[in-house]
Image (cartoon, coloured by chain):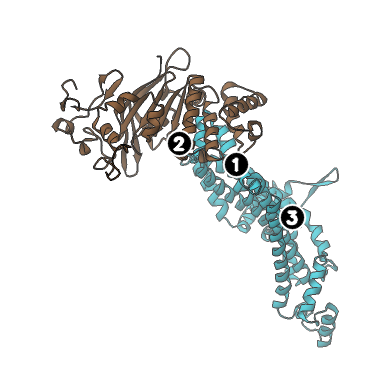
Amino acid sequence: MTRILSVKDLVIKFYTFDGVVHALNNIAFDLEEGETLAIVGESGSGKSVTMLSLLHLLPMPPAKIENGEAWFYGDGKEPVDLLKLNRSGISKIRGGKIGFIFQDALSALNPVMTIGRQISESTMEHLGLSHAKAKEKTIKLLKRVGIPGARQRYDNFPHQFSGGMRQRVMIAVSMACNPKIVIADEPTTALDVTVQAQIVDLTKELQKEFNIAVVWITHDLGVVAGMADRVLVMYAGAPVEIAKAQDLYAKPQHPYTIGLMNALPNMKGDGDSRLASIDGMPPDLMEEPQHCQFVWRCSHAFDRCWKEIPQQIHVGDNHIVSCFFDVDKGRPRENA
Amino acid sequence: MQRYILSRLFQSFIMLVGVLFIVFFMLQLTGDPVALMVSRNASPEQVEELREELGFNRPVMVQFADFISKAVRGDFGMSLRHNQPAMELILERLPATVELASIALLFAMVVGIPLGLLGGANPGSIWDAFARGAGLIGQTIPNFWLALILIMVFAVNLGWFPSFGRETWQFMGLALPTKSVVLPAFALGLFTMGQLVRFTRSAVLEIKNEDFVRTAYSKGLADWRVYVKHILRNAAIPLISILGVQFGYLLSGSIYIETIFSWPGLGNLLAESIGNRDFALVQAIAFFTSLVVVSLNLTADIAYGMADPRIRYGEQ
């Protein structure tokens, strides 16, 4: 496996009128070529902020990148730090090397531009194609993502498509220039379940076909199990656990991940039992973190958890957790 | 789209009927129209004679029917002062007003829209301060005052432009504008310019936060491309209807400016005819102006429909 992206120590704050929001605290993860990394976590945990910041798509101000590196290995021989790129540098990466699929395709597509043009303009920009060539390529792509009558549909507007078809168009937009990475920001949330499955399958097919690494942002653990190679679990702007998907489901190491798994409805349970939940509320991000952010809700918390921020430690093959407590042994870790 | 146009046409028709109604009864409301037309020391016999001659002795509804049937044929009667059909006088004066209004609108668009775009694109910047200043000044300076100041500075003191009248340059049968239009067009267009700055600025500010703009950036498009192809293209749709309304305002609202600059247009004619109590002419101008405004709004509505695919294809 070759590394395609390596994010280190990413810290992002939002400077608002009410105070400083500590949106991301030391996010670090790697992405391999062609793999699928799912980022899960509740709303406000920083999933989207992480990925948007890499492409300079966060509104700055109020957002500010305080620290961090994001090495991208897919642009020529030398790796580039995405966070240090200038305006024209990042424009070449956006769409050309890293594509984005947004959540709500209706609002994410320009209502007064034909979908054909919205795909073509990207290929014309990055691949330098002529109008005619870009159109042919777009029609091929539309066929590939499963739009019936692609040639006629080229001149249609977003509102003339159904929700699922629009999301297919969105996928075509993101993959128009054969990118190395596609970031999918909750692309199935606005769709009904059968369409969700089609979109997931389509993404998987295209990923294999073009060897694209996919970062799939979601809070749907079912989708994660179905498609992710590895999973990054985020909580309150911090990475709590990174593991292979099967490891995460089989032996979660972080108390938060364990809580999430317990909260999944179980088909075998009797019909009367209530769904489990994690007690408490996510912390206020206005306060600068001094210790583990999960400590208020954690049943394993001990005195050290209130004093220090846990660092990422390797607990197995490709399994990283940020916790002082060893849930397997039922006592604090010695090597943390 | 056809149904959309038909429904707009029907609305315009209803509006014009209403205008005819108001224009006719406006005259009745002023009391005895004949009393206003004759001189103060006319004998009652003379008044009665004129009343009979003009048909004012007939029942009101008969007069109204007569008025409507003539009006739809473009016959608004004779101007008493000019002794010429009212409509003919209007058509004579129309080119001057169209010239003034078009150049005023052109100035307002060329300055207002880019300024609004620059301000909206960089809120809080020096450009934005400039745009907001221009918007405020344009909308708050009274145009009759501005006209006087312009005459004082640029016509009297500097002598760059004539202070009154209209000169045209005859070229291939066309009467093209000369520098005589500059001062009146500036004075007239400044308000519209202010409106366009403010409107474009707020439209850009709103649209640039839309999700599809983020998508456009995520495709790696250059800034100018995002602004022109995505933001401005979306802002243009509401802008079209504003432009229609503003052009109607410019075509009809130039009484002060045309009077101050002695511009031989419709506004000047209207002011003159009111002063002369030339009622046939006042009625004709009032109706004609409404006709222009209504048709411009109709045109803007149709253009709006064509520019917005959601309306264009909405009924298929």
Where A250 falls versus B80 (above or below)? above
Q: Which chain is cyan?
A: B
Judged left or right of residue B65, residue B10 is left
Crowd class of label 1 (few under 14; some 14 to 19; many from 20; radius 10 Å): some
Q: Chain of mark 3?
A: B
Query: Which type of secondary structure does the marked residue at label 3 adopt?
Result: helix
Instruction: Look at label 1 and name its amino acid.
Output: Gln
Q: Position of residue B215 (x, y in %)?
A: 51, 34
Seen as rendered, the residue at the extreme top is A77
Seen as rendered, the residue at the extreme bottom is B44
Discs 3, 2: same chain:
no
Instruction: Look at label 2 and name its amino acid.
Output: Thr
Instruction: Look at label 3 and name its amino acid.
Output: Thr
| Residue under numbered circle 2 | A188
Discs 1, 3: same chain:
no
Q: Chain of mark 2?
A: A
Crowd class of label 2 (few under 14; some 14 to 19; many from 20; radius 10 Å): many
Q: Chain of mark 1?
A: A
In the rendered image, which quarter is residue A240 located in?
top left
| Residue under numbered circle 1 | A160
Q: Do the residues under discs 1 and 3 have CB atoms within 8 angstroms?
A: no
Where A56 falls versus B208 (above or below)? above
Q: Which chain is brown?
A: A
Q: Gap between marks 1 and 2, in whole Å?
A: 19 Å
Query: Which type of secondary structure does the marked residue at label 2 adopt?
Result: loop
Q: Position of residue B8 (x, y in %)?
A: 68, 56
Viewer can see residue B209: yes
| Residue under numbered circle 3 | B97
What numbered label is drawn on residue B28? none
Query: Which type of secondary structure does the marked residue at label 1 adopt?
Result: helix
